[in-house]
Image (tube, rainbow, N blue to C red):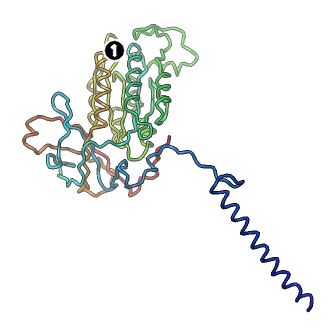
Amino acid sequence: MRYKALTRPFLLLLAIAALLCGGALLSTNSEASVTGTGPLALASPSPTPRTREDLPQDSDEVVKFDTNLTNIFFTAADKNRRFISDLKAEDIRVLEDGQQQEIFTFQTNIDLPLSIAILIDTSASEERTLPDEKEAARAFLENMMRPTRDEAAIVSFTGETTLEQGFTGNVERLRRAIDRVEFVPPSGYIGGGVVVNGTPPISGTNQTLAGSTAIWDAVWATSEELISASAENTRRAIILLTDGDDTSSRMKIHDAIERAQKADALIYAIGIGDRYTFNVDEGSLRKIAEQTGGRAYFPRHERDLRDAFAQIQRDLREQYLVAYSPSNKARDGSYRRIEIQLVNPALKQQNLKLNYRSGYFAKTAPGDGPVRKRGQ
């Protein structure tokens, strides 16, 4: 009993002493965290550039999309290809499969972030013009890119498709990727599009591919594997530099168009090549551009090539956005044809050219699966 009586005061004193020591330690550690001088000091993180997913949802830099609406981007230009920037919602009407739709959103000059893939034909027909193409592509990216908002990728192709640089906002990486693009002559090539027969090389398959051009395969693969995985809520576009003469694609042109439409990608075709030896297939390039909502250009000189890139840049930056809820609610994956008509009599007399994609594929399920967010 005496042992218990003596122990209680002793234990009480020990408890009080522990509390006093603990308070002193807490005070010291708290001071160290604030002043940054003690052993538990926290390192201050260095500021990093904001990416799109870091922006607050009420930021002016965020464009919100309703997944139940169909969003159509379009441009308007006069006969001299001057952009018309003062259209209003009441100036147009939208038809889907011939049925007029109710417009929910009409906005002008939608300056969305961009996801752009530049496809460069490196077959024999581009041997003479490839240096000019590379220089124009470099200048385009340097003028166009906003590293914290836009992203681009570089793809080269002959009979096979090569990813030179995946999507990035780093202009220097893109510049180096363009520098790596070069003409790959097939076995027996002596210049000017002439190939002489001789001893077949050991790597016969690769040389055969180098001597062919698979344009539609390249567009299909880029839309399927690259554009479809690009950042969410960006304006997607493919810039295609080629003469349009496809010699070896397994895919047909309509397959390439359909895949680009499903990826919601515009195709801007620049028909260029050695016109002294090869022909430029203007019909195919116009078709793939117009049916995806892009444009086709056929430069004759270096200045024309620079002008084409400048018009593409303006086209991507100065667009109208019209959004509507389709009257056809079926999620059946069917193709829906779109038509935008001018209803303003004064504007109709000006013969304006409205440029937009010709249709889209309806969704087949409520969710579209995961979407890649913007990387660096």
- Is the residue 12 above or below the residue 120 in the image? below
- Is the residue 144 above or below the residue 28 in the image? above
Picture coordinates of residue 156, whole percent (x, y): 45, 26
- Confirm whether residue 248 shows in the render: no
The image quadrant of residue 108 is: top left
Picture coordinates of residue 321, whole percent (x, y): 26, 46
Picture coordinates of residue 141, whole percent (x, y): 40, 29
User: Which element type, helix, strand or loop, lies under badge 1?
Assistant: loop
- Dot 1 amino acid type: Phe
Residue extending farthest to the bottom is 1
Q: Residues within 10 Å of mark 1 (few under 14, many from 20)?
A: some
Q: Residue at x 42, y 42 (%)?
A: 228
Q: Is residue 339 left or right of residue 19?
A: left
Of 314 and 156, the residue lying toward us: 314
- Is the residue 361 above or below the residue 202 in the image? below
Quadrant of the image containing the N terminus: bottom right
Q: Residue at x 58, y 16 (%)?
A: 202
Q: How many marks?
A: 1
- Confirm whether residue 119 shows in the render: yes
Q: Residue at x 26, y 47 (%)?
A: 336
Q: Is residue 84 left or right of residue 141?
A: left
Of 273 and 43, the residue lying toward us: 43
Of 157 and 213, the residue lying toward us: 157
Of 52 and 218, the residue lying toward us: 52
Q: Is residue 345 left or right of residue 105?
A: left
Residue extending farthest to the right is 2
Residue indicated by mark 1: 278
Picture coordinates of residue 230, whole percent (x, y): 44, 42
Q: Is residue 257 left or right of residue 155?
A: left
The image quadrant of residue 245 is: top left
Q: Residue at x 40, y 17 (%)?
A: 130
